[in-house]
Every structure is written in structure tokens, then in C-alpha cells.
Image (cartoon, rainbow, N blue to C red):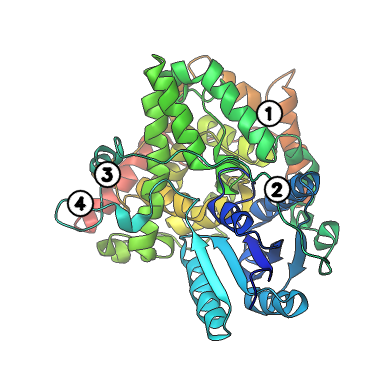
Amino acid sequence: MTDKSPIIMWFRRDLRLGDHAALTAACESGRPVIPLFIHDEVVAGQGAAPRFRLGLSVGALGNDLKAAGSQLILRKGNALDVLRAVIAETGATAVYWSRQYDVTAKDRDIAVKAALKDQGIAAHSFAGHLLFEPWTVETKTGGFYKVYTPMWRSVRDRAVPDSLPRPGAIPSPESWPETDVLEDWQMGADMRRGHDVVLQHCTVGEAAAADRLDAFVAQWIAYYQTNRDLPAIKGTSGLSENLTYGEISPRVCWHAGWRALHDGKADAEIFLKELVWREFAYHLSHHTPRIETGNWKPDWDAFPWNTDKTTPEVIAWQQGRTGIQFIDAAMREMYVTGVMHNRGRMIVASYLTKHLLCHWKIGLDWFADCLIDWDPASNAMGWQWSAGSGPDATPYFRVFNPVTQLDKFDKDRVYVQKWIAEGRSKPTETALSYFDAIPKRWSMTADTRYPDPIVAADEGRKRALGAYENRGF
């Protein structure tokens, strides 16, 4: 081992050059740095939309590295096998990466680190995907937080280090190992017809993410508390798409929010709370990994949810054909843009799990296939929060009424008109795009009759409350 042996910088969900602790450490070592992205078993296991969007981010990172005088090496296969192969080809003696906290990624990383160390290879993991490492946030009695609000209070005033600048230079090796061609991976192939539709709505790469944050702080953060609940307007940051792939760091967002708050934009605190809500999801995923696969509250294991995802009710929900306008508009927004307004996510999740009494895992899996901003921890916590089986201080018997929610947050039906075409003489372009994005086998057009409700709002609430009562909840 010499001081000039290369370091492999293994990129995963940290696809940026700025505020990147692992990359900065590698560059400051003075040793050659070999940026590497592996299409491994974790990537292969992702749904169609997340894998498609990840491919776009990998491409953007490759362009940024090329502009910086470096290169992104692409390989496909088992993560450990690929790392060992690149180590053998380059003489690298260290691998750096940014930590991930979901169960699948952690299991992989623990095994990889142990195997590399046994081989005499230095394996170093760094923070960067979160503001606070989950094991550093504790209650006064030493346990982890199971309720969001106390966690927010505990970290609100905690010091967060300044963001790191981009490395001034990324030292290159004398020769580069061979690389795959990104296009050959066809990471967007499973999107089929939806590929070109959703692509128009993606905001990809580190520079675009920074511009998105700047525009949000300049124009929208001052009105965030009210506007974030109105799905018809641009009231949110949209940064979930970029945060999930690490095109922007939460630390950069955190400091931007605090600057806005100090500039007199009081609503910026709500934005900061949303960043900590994301932290809370990973906090729970780290301490209670069962949240990703089973009921966070074990007493829900006996609840008689429907688990058959082929029932007509589930299919109607998936297709945005429930006859409940808020539900259908939100689902169609997801098929066209790859994202869904947060208010919509709460409503469609509540409707599936409570009005239709379907297991939250049906919805979790569907979102994991359809969302370009899919995040393993946030998706799991969000679905369990809505279903009542998760970390929510509000009683499980809260059932959102999708009709009154629409009256409250889309009074003039602007959102509905934007996404539902049936029954309208002049549908909007966005509403028509839905029919271009969905599978042909659904056999739907804008002339198809809009359905009557499969389960009315009041009827669904009564059914849910009756099911809770009968199970002794």
C-alpha cells in the first residue's frame, strides 16, 4: 500500500459534487480518485419510475465529473464482486461511500465493509444523506424518538456544520478502468409509454436542484405554510425529487431555510420542519427497521385488511378511476409527472387503507413503482402514518374525507380540472397526458365515462370505523 494508491469513490444516493464529505475526503488525500457507480442488486430491485429517474441522475453526475476533468466508471453486478474487480484492475486500496439507512442498503453495506476489510482494503463510510445521524438523536432518557414533535424540538436549534464546497480538483488515476455505457443499461425501459411523458417533468442534476432551491426561497417559501396544502398551485419546493438521489444535500436546504427565516420569512420554519420529518422517517427506519416491511405497531398484525391487489376496488384506485375526484386527480398527477402533491398522498393513502380497507403494503408497493421521488424510509413511514399502524400521535380512527378535503384545498376545482379529462369539452393538456402515460391494456380514453364512486366518502368512513370497533381498537 502506497500513498498514491487510488481511492474508489462509490456513488449511490449522493449523486453530486458539492457538500459531499466522502468525495471531499478522497480528494484531500492527494491520491487518485476513481468515481464508480454500480448497478447492483439494490438498484435492480427498485421500481420502474425510481430506477428510470436514478438513471437520469447518474447521467447528470457523469457529465459533471467529465466537466471537472474526471470520469464516472459504470459497472453492473453484485456490489462486492464489482468492487473487488475494480480494486484488482486499478490497485485501489480504499473505498469511500456515503451512508444509507434503509434496511436493504444497510445489509449490503455491512457485508461489503466486512468483506473489504478482510481483504485488507480500507472501507470508510461518511455522513451526507441526513442532517443528523440517527444514533445521535436521543430522548432525555436515552431512547429514540417515536413521536415527531419532540424530535423536532430536540434538533431545531442543534448546530449543523456549514456545507462543503465542491472539491477544487479531483485527482485522476494514470489510467482508467473500463466502463459500461449508461444507455446500455436501459434503466427507463420499464416505464414504457410513460417514459417520454414523465421525462418532461423531471428536474435532473445538481445544478438544476440548486436552481430549484433558490427559486423556492426567493418566490415561495414566504407563503409556504398556506400554499403547501394547495395542490393546484406551486407552493412546495419540489426538492424531494432531488434529495432522494442526493443531487442536493439536506444540509444545503437546511441552511437556506434558516437564512430565509432570519430574513423575516416566518414560513421558512415549516420548511425546516419538513426536512426534519424526512429525518424522522430515517430515524425510525434505523431504529425500527420493521417499519419498511411490517406494521410498526404490532397490534395491527391482526387487523383484517384486504391483501388482494387484484380486486376491482384496488384496480380502480390504481387507475385513478375511483369516482372520487381528489383521489383520481392525485393518482393521475403521479402517472404524468412522477410525483404527487403531499396533500394528495395523504388522501389517496387514507382512502385505500380506510375507505377501501386495503393493506398499506399494496399502496406502498404501488408508489415504489410509480414515484420518481420514491424514498424507502419516507414511503414506509407515510403509508403507515396514513393507515394508522405507524408513528402517529393522532388516534388511528382519523379518516380523511376526500370530498371535504377537496372543498377545503381545491375549492374552485382547479386541481381536478388539471388532471381529470372525462366529461369536459376542452380537457387540459395535463389531463390528456394521463392517457398517453398509462398502459394501453387499461383501454381508457378521454371519452370514457367518468365513474360513480366505488365507495362513497361517508360510507367508507362508517365501514372503517366499524372494522376498528369489531377488532377492539
User: Which is more N-terminal, label 3 or label 4?
Assistant: 4
Estimate the spatial distance between the alpha carbons at disc 4 and disc 3, rounded to whole Å. Answer: 8 Å
Considering the numbered disc 1 on the image, is that residue within a helix, a strand or a loop? loop
User: Which is more N-terminal, label 1 or label 4?
Assistant: 4
Considering the numbered disc 2 on the image, is that residue within a helix, a strand or a loop? loop
Q: Kindly identify which residue carries mark 2.
A: 169
User: Which is more N-terminal, label 1 or label 2?
Assistant: 2
Q: Residue at x 29, y 53 (%)?
A: 467
Which of 367/52 is in front? 52
Determine the image quadrant of residue 262. Answer: top left
Estimate the spatial distance between the alpha carbons at disc 2 and disc 1, rounded to whole Å. Answer: 55 Å
Estimate the spatial distance between the alpha carbons at disc 2 and disc 3, rounded to whole Å. Answer: 39 Å
Which of 75/93 is in front? 93
Q: Kindly identify which residue carries mark 3.
A: 151
Q: Nearer the viewer, mark 2 or mark 3?
A: 2
Amino acid type assigned to the residue bearing label 4 in the image: Thr
Amino acid type assigned to the residue bearing label 1 in the image: Glu
Estimate the spatial distance between the alpha carbons at disc 4 and disc 2, rounded to whole Å. Answer: 42 Å
Considering the numbered disc 4 on the image, is that residue within a helix, a strand or a loop? loop
How would you rate the neighbour count of disc 4 (Cα within 10 Å): few for under 14, some for 14-19, many for 20 or more?
Answer: few
Q: Kindly identify which residue carries mark 4.
A: 139
Q: Nearer the viewer, mark 2 or mark 1?
A: 2
Q: Residue at x 60, y 47 (%)?
A: 371
Q: Residue 440: give x, y in percent of width and height.
A: 78, 48
Estimate the spatial distance between the alpha carbons at disc 4 and disc 1, rounded to whole Å. Answer: 52 Å
Determine the image quadrant of residue 189. Answer: bottom right
Q: Residue 120: give x, y in percent of width and height.
A: 57, 83
Amino acid type assigned to the residue bearing label 2 in the image: Ala
Q: Is residue 229 visible?
A: yes
User: Which is more N-terminal, label 3 or label 1?
Assistant: 3
